[in-house]
Image: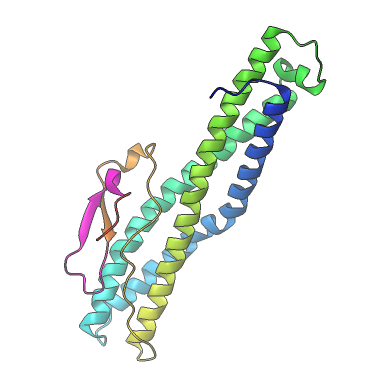
């Protein structure tokens, strides 16, 4: 169904775009903080893997966490880039609507607008709807990445506790829920360890286009 290009529908779509972008910006703080978490986790994982006084099971966890951390670091880079891109592009559109002379007529609603003006509104409406769809999908990816990184940090801490004798060795989560976008051409060809197990045996490797699949 084609949405009629009117000032009202444009206003509704612009409101929805502002809302979803506001949500993305609020998620960007935790997202940007993931880099420090991943770096710290890598250092601690290496320490576990290189320790001479831990069990084979702990070392198995460390190896599994190491592959998972590498995958999450690559996904992190892609999600950060995608988030920055969509926010910048949508912000540029919003700025144009308020400052570009082409859209100055939007500031003074009228019943006498001509066909050309409604064509301009129609174009803005279509562009806005595209941004909304992209931002909504990206929001889910950002949430997934934040959750995945937090879960891995918890797994590292639990493995450390088990190594020190103060906790139970955790089972490493078998899936990474945040996926790589189709625009990530620089990541093409990478091997992705999407399924990891505590004992390391039977690691399942999927290529980037297959990241949507879940480990059995």
Q: Is residue 44 left or right of residue 33?
A: left
Q: In the rendered image of this protein, does residue 65 appear above or below residue 208?
A: below
Q: Is residue 85 visible?
A: no
Of residues 29 and 144, the one drawn nearer to the viewer in this rendering: 144
Q: Which residues are magenta?
A: 196-211
- In which image quadrant can residue 198 be found? bottom left
Q: Is residue 185 visible?
A: yes
Q: In the rendered image of this protein, does residue 167 appear above or below residue 142?
A: below
Residue 151 percent coordinates (x, y)? 43, 68
Q: Residue at x 35, y 86 (%)?
A: 168
Q: Quadrant of the C terminus?
A: bottom left
Q: In the rendered image of this protein, does residue 2 appear above or below residue 178?
A: above
Q: Residue at x 41, y 78 (%)?
A: 157
Colouring used for the render: rainbow
- In which image quadrant can residue 165 be found? bottom left
Q: Residue at x 46, y 50 (%)?
A: 141
Residue 160 percent coordinates (x, y)? 37, 81
Residue 112 percent coordinates (x, y)? 80, 10
Name, please, the residue furthest toward the left: 202
Q: Residue at x 67, y 8 (%)?
A: 116
């Amino acid at each position: 169904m084609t949405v009629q290009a009117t000032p009202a529908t444009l206003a509704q779509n612009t409101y929805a775009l502002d809302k979803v972008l506001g949500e993305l910006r609020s998620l960007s703080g935790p997202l940007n903080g993931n880099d420090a978490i991943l770096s710290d986790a890598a250092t601690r994982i290496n320490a576990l893997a290189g320790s001479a006084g831990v069990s084979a099971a702990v070392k198995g966890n460390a190896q599994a966490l190491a592959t998972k951390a590498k995958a999450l670091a690559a996904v992190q880079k892609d999600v950060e880039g995608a988030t920055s891109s969509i926010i910048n592009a949508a912000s540029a559109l919003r700025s144009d609507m308020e400052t570009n002379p082409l859209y100055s007529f939007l500031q003074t609603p009228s019943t006498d607008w001509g066909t050309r003006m409604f064509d301009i509104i129609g174009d803005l409406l279509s562009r806005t709807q595209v941004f909304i769809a992209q931002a909504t999908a990206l929001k889910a990816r950002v949430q997934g990445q934040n959750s995945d990184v937090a879960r891995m940090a918890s797994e590292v801490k639990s493995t450390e506790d088990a190594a020190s004798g103060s906790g139970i060795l955790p089972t490493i989560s078998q899936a990474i829920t945040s996926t790589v976008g189709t625009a990530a051409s620089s990541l093409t060809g990478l091997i992705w360890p999407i399924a990891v197990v505590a004992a390391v045996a039977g690691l399942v490797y999927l290529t980037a286009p297959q990241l949507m699949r879940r480990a059995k």
